[in-house]
């Protein structure tokens, strides 16, 4: 007969399990009570460790100069505020009483003494967690190459925690000598009942926190670019968290005292105030010359008049489409276009149009600003060759120096200070973080362009001005693609009229608002990616009538190839030009995660095993957890890239179709000779070694992107061959 289980043993095990479960419930109660410290540390950790941009921010942490100093100050302040306000909250009499009652209700015997332990150690854990987050972020980037930074932060964290643990003897000694540290506690309790019964020292910390928040708000609101770039993005975020913790903690304490949901009420008020406080207006300039913009047909004729050449050779005409991808896309765009201009002086004059999306639009705007001020020779030749290590590339150098700045710092500073305050203020009186982002591009341009006397202000000046020159050379027409929120259609800012019979189902930005905008604002409208840069409010310049909102162009199609294809159709009908033309289509893509099946043109290897299998190498799911919740959003995000891939492949097929028609059907397109398609890829890297999608890049990422045109690096994505193809076509080959 089987031996029966001892009921007392089972009862004891179940009691231990129940006691452990009650301990977890008590711990959760403490975390919930100190939730603002817990929440800010948790969010900081997730963003810094588990996102690509967070990894890049960790890469940017350098303890040099003022930025390094402010980072250490922000890190220490964040840790101390997380500790102090958790400790202050847990020291209040009603919190302690509720905790003890809760512990007694759960299991008095097992939990005896745990309330005192958690009261001491949970706040210290929050402070330690701030340093641990930074440690892990640096470890992820490879701390061996940044050992001094790692050791300094490690030592600073260790000293901070040591002081927090062993501070009490020193404080007790000072308490005996000064009333400054004495708690004004009630006679029947060892803990203060409210914040006003805290010691003078504690109330001083509270006052300094409030004053610091107000002063930081005033400084960042007045000078968001200076503040963001002086502090750096990571320090700006840490400062914001450090000043949010006391405000949120005080509101939590107030909620407990008055028995009214103060924080929930404020959130409801923010929702109500959002009906009147939209500060993200797309800023119009004067009407300017918007009615004098040429049609596509007229622009092609104008281009031809400035690109005449002797002989019967067809004239190369370049059309560029450059994809989105934040700062890496902008940097890669200027890297490619700058190198082509440096190697071929006729490149800009031959380039009819650049169609950009998001970061690609920012890079196109910088390149257009460079060329708008450059004296171009309409008869310049093309003598260059491949890009080699050590080449002098002045155009590329200036463009990439402009985009080598930290644009995330000002944006984060504006988002977490004035823009956050704006959410609770009923009038649009604070500066939009989107406009701060655009202003930071302008500031970087003004600091790095050459010559400064003539170039300063160009990126922040009227959009149409970069297309208007009195010399005989051509400047590329820009097509900066955004998305109209209410209709989902393209919203294009261009030097050429967006006619419905040419650019199907697209809105003309200039016609919608009835005015010109700055070049930086036009790029911003195309680069309003989720949350970092908010949707722009569209109003007519004269009557201030609402016309919807504008979103990132990647919501519609992330490559700019759909607009480039419509330009190609215009070229097909331009059969009365004085000379034959040789179209050169350049597609610039900035996604290092593209699989082989997403390549366009001759970069696509049809014999690749992945294509033969039909599933592109995907053999198992990578989103097992919560896949039902994650799949819709993930699918929509991937769709934007997929539509871009499709548009680029369609453009390539159109080019191939024209080639075949020219060979088999003589006279079908007699004015178009041997069109060329070139596809520049951002070379694939290891998962931990790819440039991030964001508005700040480390020097290491910048160097990697610049090297993607070099043969040694280029083996993975064939950019050297694509570059040679474009140069050969520009030379007439």
Image (cartoon, rainbow, N blue to C red):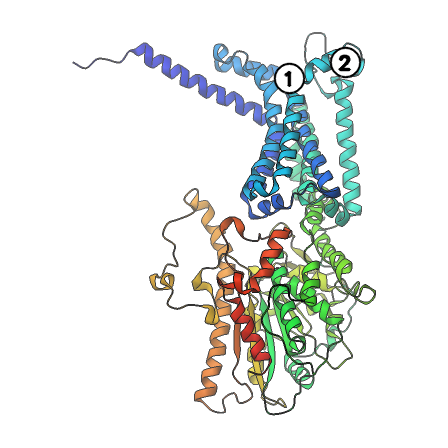
Disc 2 is placed on an element classified as helix
Percent position of residue 162, x then y? 64, 22
Q: Nearer the viewer, residue 420 or 451?
A: 451
**Earlier-in-chain disc, 1 versus 2:** 1
Crowding at label 2, few (<14), some or many (≥20) Cα neighbours within 10 Å? some
Q: Is residue 260 above or below residue 594?
A: above
Residue underneath mark 2: 174
Q: Is residue 278 above or below residue 510?
A: above
Disc 1 is placed on an element classified as helix
Query: Mark 1 or 2, which is nearer the eye?
Result: 2
User: Label 1 vs label 2: CA separation?
Assistant: 27 Å
Q: Nearer the viewer, residue 188 or 1?
A: 1
| Image position of 8 (left or right of 483) | left
The residue positioned 77% from the left and 20% from the top of the image is 201
Q: Is residue 358 visible?
A: no
Residue underneath mark 1: 94
| Image position of 8 (left or right of 649) | left
């Amino acid at each position: 007969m089987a031996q029966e289980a001892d009921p007392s043993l089972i009862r004891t095990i179940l009691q231990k399990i129940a006691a452990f479960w009650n301990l977890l419930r008590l711990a959760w109660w403490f975390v919930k009570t100190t939730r603002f410290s817990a929440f800010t540390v948790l969010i900081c950790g997730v963003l810094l460790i588990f996102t690509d941009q967070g990894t890049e921010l960790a890469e940017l942490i350098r303890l040099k100069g003022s930025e390094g100093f402010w980072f250490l100050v922000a890190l220490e302040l964040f840790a101390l505020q997380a500790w102090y306000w958790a400790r202050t909250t847990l020291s209040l009499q009603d919190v302690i009483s509720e905790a003890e009652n809760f512990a007694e209700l759960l299991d008095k015997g097992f939990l005896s003494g745990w309330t005192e332990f958690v009261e001491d150690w949970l706040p210290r854990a929050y402070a330690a967690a701030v340093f641990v987050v930074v440690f892990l972020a640096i470890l992820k980037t490879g701390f061996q190459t940044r050992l001094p930074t790692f050791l300094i932060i490690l030592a600073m964290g260790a000293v901070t925690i040591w002081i927090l643990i062993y501070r009490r003897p020193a404080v007790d000694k000072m308490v005996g000598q000064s009333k400054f540290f004495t708690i004004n506690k009630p006679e029947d309790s060892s803990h203060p009942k409210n914040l006003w019964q805290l010691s003078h020292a504690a109330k001083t910390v509270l006052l300094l926190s409030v004053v610091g928040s107000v002063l930081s708000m005033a400084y960042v609101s007045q000078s968001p670019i200076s503040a963001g770039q002086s502090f750096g993005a990571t320090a700006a975020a840490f400062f914001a968290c450090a000043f949010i913790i006391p405000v949120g903690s005080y509101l939590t304490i107030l909620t407990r005292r008055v028995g009214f949901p103060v924080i929930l009420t404020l959130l409801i008020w923010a929702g109500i105030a959002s009906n009147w406080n939209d500060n993200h207006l797309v800023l119009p300039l004067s009407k300017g010359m918007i009615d004098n913009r040429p049609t596509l047909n007229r622009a092609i004729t104008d281009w031809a008049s400035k690109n005449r050449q002797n002989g019967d050779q067809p004239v190369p005409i370049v059309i560029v489409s450059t994809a989105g991808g934040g700062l890496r896309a902008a940097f890669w765009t200027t890297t490619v276009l700058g190198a082509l201009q440096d190697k071929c002086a006729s490149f800009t004059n031959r380039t009819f149009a650049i169609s950009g999306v998001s970061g690609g639009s920012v890079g196109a705007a910088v390149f257009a600003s460079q060329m708008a001020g450059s004296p171009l020779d309409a008869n310049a030749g093309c003598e260059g060759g491949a890009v080699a290590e050590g080449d002098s590339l002045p155009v590329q150098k200036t463009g990439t120096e402009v985009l080598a700045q930290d644009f995330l710092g000002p944006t984060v500073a504006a988002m977490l200070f004035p823009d956050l305050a704006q959410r609770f203020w009923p009038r649009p009186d604070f500066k939009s973080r989107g406009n701060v982002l655009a202003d930071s591009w302008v500031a970087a341009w003004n600091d790095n362009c050459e010559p400064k006397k003539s170039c300063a202000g160009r990126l922040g000046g009227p959009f149409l001005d970069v297309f208007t020159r009195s010399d005989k050379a051509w400047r590329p027409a820009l097509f900066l693609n955004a998305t109209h929120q209410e209709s989902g259609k393209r919203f294009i800012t261009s030097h050429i009229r967006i006619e419905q019979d040419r650019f199907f189902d697209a809105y003309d930005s200039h016609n919608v608002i009835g005015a010109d905008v700055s070049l930086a604002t036009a790029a911003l409208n195309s680069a309003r990616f989720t949350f970092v840069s908010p949707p722009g409010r569209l109003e007519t310049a004269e009557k201030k009538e609402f016309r919807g909102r504008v979103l990132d162009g990647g919501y519609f199609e992330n490559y700019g190839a759909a607009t480039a294809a419509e330009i190609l159709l215009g070229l097909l009908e331009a059969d009365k030009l004085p000379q034959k033309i040789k179209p050169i289509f350049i597609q610039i893509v900035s996604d290092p995660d593209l699989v082989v099946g997403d390549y366009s043109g001759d970069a696509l290897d049809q014999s690749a095993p992945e294509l033969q299998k039909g599933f592109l190498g995907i053999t198992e799911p990578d989103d097992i957890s919560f896949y039902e919740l994650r799949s819709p959003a993930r699918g929509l995000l991937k769709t934007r890239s997929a539509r871009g891939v499709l548009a680029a492949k369609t453009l390539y097929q159109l080019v191939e179709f024209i080639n075949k028609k020219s060979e088999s059907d003589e006279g079908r397109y007699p004015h178009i000779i041997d069109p060329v398609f070139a596809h520049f890829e951002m070379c694939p890297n290891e998962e931990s070694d790819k440039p991030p999608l964001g508005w700040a890049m480390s020097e290491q990422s910048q160097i990697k992107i610049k090297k993607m045109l070099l043969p040694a690096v280029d083996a993975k994505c064939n950019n050297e061959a694509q570059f040679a193809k474009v140069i050969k076509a520009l030379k007439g080959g």
